[in-house]
Amino acid sequence: MKALLCPGEGVQLVDRPEPRAGAGEVVLAVRSAGICNTDLELARGYMGFRGVLGHEFVGDVVEGPGGSRPPAKWAGRRVAAEINCACRGCPVCSQGHGNHCPTRTVLGILGRDGALAERIAVPLSTLHALPDALEDEQAVFVEPLAAALHAFDEVELARKDRVLLLGDGKLGLLIGLALADRRDQVARALAVGRHREKLAILAARGLEVALEQEFDEPAGFDLVIEATGSPHGLTSALKAVRPLGTLVLKSTYAGDASVDLAPIVVNELRVVGSRCGDFPRAIAALARGQVDPRPLISERFSLEDAERAFARAGEPGVIKVLVDPLRAG
Ligand SMILES: [Zn+2]
Ligand SMILES: [Zn+2]
């Protein structure tokens, strides 16, 4: 089958054997997969990953262990799959924190092939059936939307709160759409980014927006969500949050950040790291139309064109690029 491989750095469209499902696993035929900023970072050496990229996707359950029929409950179902494959037996897993299992593998990120391919093998325990009403182009956002919604999990929004979102990239915009859905719960919700056309997507959903270069009131926010994907965003976020305020960090990137951490101590900030989120909630938010990510789709490619798709995903102004293995090349 065709697959987009990260051989350590960069990407390569390769032919490789179809995956086989191990015990407790199934093989999915990928319908559509999104390219995320993490994929771009992995191709720059983040995590030292070698393997098939891709962790945002929708697929059909086609095969059980060793080429057998999949369990009846799942055969032929269209699904989204969680990306963290936990051991389900260690103390961390027993406490319900499988996303932090020390021996986990992560689809297309850590020790396990991803979804920018015709087929992918995943544990049964990661599957979530999708409602028929959801289009593939919505369902492909389940994973990143789950991560976006998770930004609000460790914070309690209050009516008086002024909330600032930094970053209008792929994840930033999804968080922005989720913030727009919560607009009535807070006093102010502002998104700051670098791209007028991207911010316009959030403005259309009722969010106040500002260009970074024109943003001149950078302090006093109760909650700041940093999703710029760059170390400089953390510096801006530390300036923008009020003393005793909360900072949620969503960015991951290859390389080290050099940041003055004194404001965290001096202003007694609460800093919350935030990664993956709850799939059922994301599926429900999509199904109810609370978040419509479709304006974020910039372009769609066949799997044959995955290298071009990957290059495109890293170009300025481009938001979400989808790769559709069922699409003719
Ligand atoms: Zn991602
Ligand atoms: Zn575990």
Image (tube, rainbow, N blue to C red):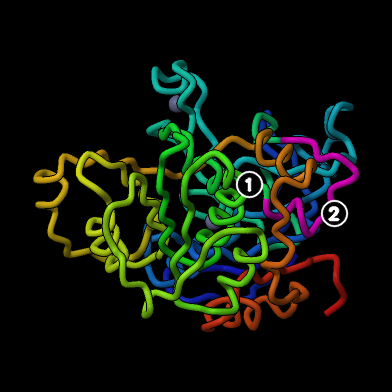
Say which amino acid is labelled 1.
Asp
Question: Gap between marks 1 and 2, in whole Å?
Answer: 20 Å
Query: Crowdedness of circle 1 by 10 Å Cα count: few (<14), some, many (20+)?
Result: some
In the image, residue 70 above or below residue 318: above
Q: Residue 22: where, in percent of width, then height?
A: 67, 36
Q: Does the residue labelled 2 lie within 8 Å of ligand 1?
A: no
Residue at the (45%, 45%) spot, across then down: 275
Q: In this view, does 120 lie to the left or right of 259?
A: right
Instruction: List the residue tagged with mark 1.
Output: 181
Which mark is first along the chain, 2 or 1? 2
Q: Is 8 left or right of 308, judged from the image as shown?
A: left
Q: Position of residue 98 (x, y in %)?
A: 48, 29
Q: What segment is highlighted magenta in the picture?
A: 128-141
- Which quadrant does the C terminus fall into? bottom right
> x%, y% of residue 323?
72, 69
Taking depth in this image into account, of 310 and 313 the one nearest to the observer is 313
Task: Give whichever of 316, 23 is nearer the camera.
Answer: 316
181 to the left or right of 325: left
Query: Tag on residue 21?
Result: none
Q: Could one spot residue 7 in this view of the protein?
A: no
Q: Nearer the viewer, residue 18 or 123?
A: 123
Q: Name the residue type under label 2.
A: Glu
Ligand 1 in which quarter: bottom right
Q: Disc 1, disc 2: CB below 8 Å?
A: no
Indicate the secondary structure of the residue bearing disc 2: loop
Answer whether residue 47 is magenta in the image: no
Give the labeled residue for mark 2.
Answer: 135
Q: In which quarter of the image is residue 166?
A: bottom left
